[in-house]
Image (tube, grey):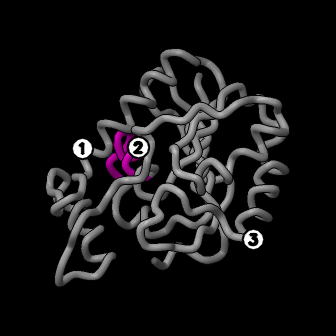
Amino acid sequence: MTTLYFVRHCESPYIEGQERSRGISAVGEQDAMKIVELLGHMPIGVFASSPYARAIQTIQPLADMMNLSVQFHEDLRERQIGVFEGMSFHEAKRKVYEEFTFSFPDGESSLGAQQRAVTVLQQLINEYDGHHIVLGTHGDIMTLMMNYFDPAYGFEFWGSTTMPDIYKLELEGMRMRGVTRLWQNNVPDAR
């Protein structure tokens, strides 16, 4: 049994054009320390993350406490929604979830983003079978990875996630045997 901890990044103020470099807020830093308290007793052996600063900063204190390094994987980055006109952000998100192969200009389809992220997951699971793995991630790409295992994880689930959020997935190979939500903030992501 391999255990994955999907750790959605802590609060991060949205700054146009700084998708990769924007970090977590002061509240996010406090929450990152709470994640250390929550997961610090788990037998975690591997840390992997999106290369985006907010995902790394969320799990780095836990990795530091465990004296482990964080592997960065470009294909775990957040999905780019692209250019959508005449729609709200939520309407655009709903469209790409409901039409899984659709993409807006300069954006990624749900299927395309899911395939690139799941490829990394498969590599990690093959290499670290039976281990506990923490993944520093984002709401959209986390939802798409979970959707790979169970299509019930879609737009509504994405809308219910918080910053931070933690889901523990128990896997046998690439079959999901259980999901447990370990943390949620009081306020869902309203962006």
Residue indicated by mark 3: 26
Question: Residue 12 location, x and y as percent?
Answer: 59, 68
Is label 3 or label 2 in front?
Answer: 3
Residue indicated by mark 2: 145
Relative to 131, 91 lies left or right: left
Crowd around label 2: few <14 · some 14–19 · many ≥20 (10 Å)? many
Q: Indicate the quadrant where residue 153 lies.
A: bottom left
Crowd around label 3: few <14 · some 14–19 · many ≥20 (10 Å)? few
Q: Residue at x 42, y 25 (%)?
A: 122
Mark 3 touching mark 2, by CB under 8 A?
no
Q: Does 159 lie within the magenta span?
A: no
Question: Residue 53 location, x and y as percent?
Answer: 58, 53
Report the magenta stretch's main SS: helix
Relative to 122, 165 lies left or right: right
Q: Eyeballing the image, is 183 above or below 90?
A: above
Q: CA distance from mark 3 to mark 1?
A: 34 Å
Is label 3 or label 1 in front?
Answer: 3
Q: Eyeballing the image, is 158 above or below 127?
A: below
Q: CA distance from mark 3 to mark 2?
A: 28 Å
Among numbered discs 3 and 1, the one appearing first in the sequence: 3
Among numbered discs 3 and 2, the one appearing first in the sequence: 3
Which stretch did the figure color magenta? Answer: 143-152
Question: Residue 123 location, x and y as percent?
Answer: 45, 22
Crowd around label 1: few <14 · some 14–19 · many ≥20 (10 Å)? some
Q: Residue at x 68, y 58 (%)?
A: 183
Q: Indicate the quadrant where residue 45 lies.
A: top right
Q: Indicate the quadrant where residue 63 lies.
A: top right
- The type of residue carrying mark 1 is Gly
User: Please, what secondary structure does the residue beneath circle 2 have?
Assistant: helix
Q: Eyeballing the image, is 161 above or below 75?
A: below
- The type of residue carrying mark 2 is Met
Residue indicated by mark 1: 112
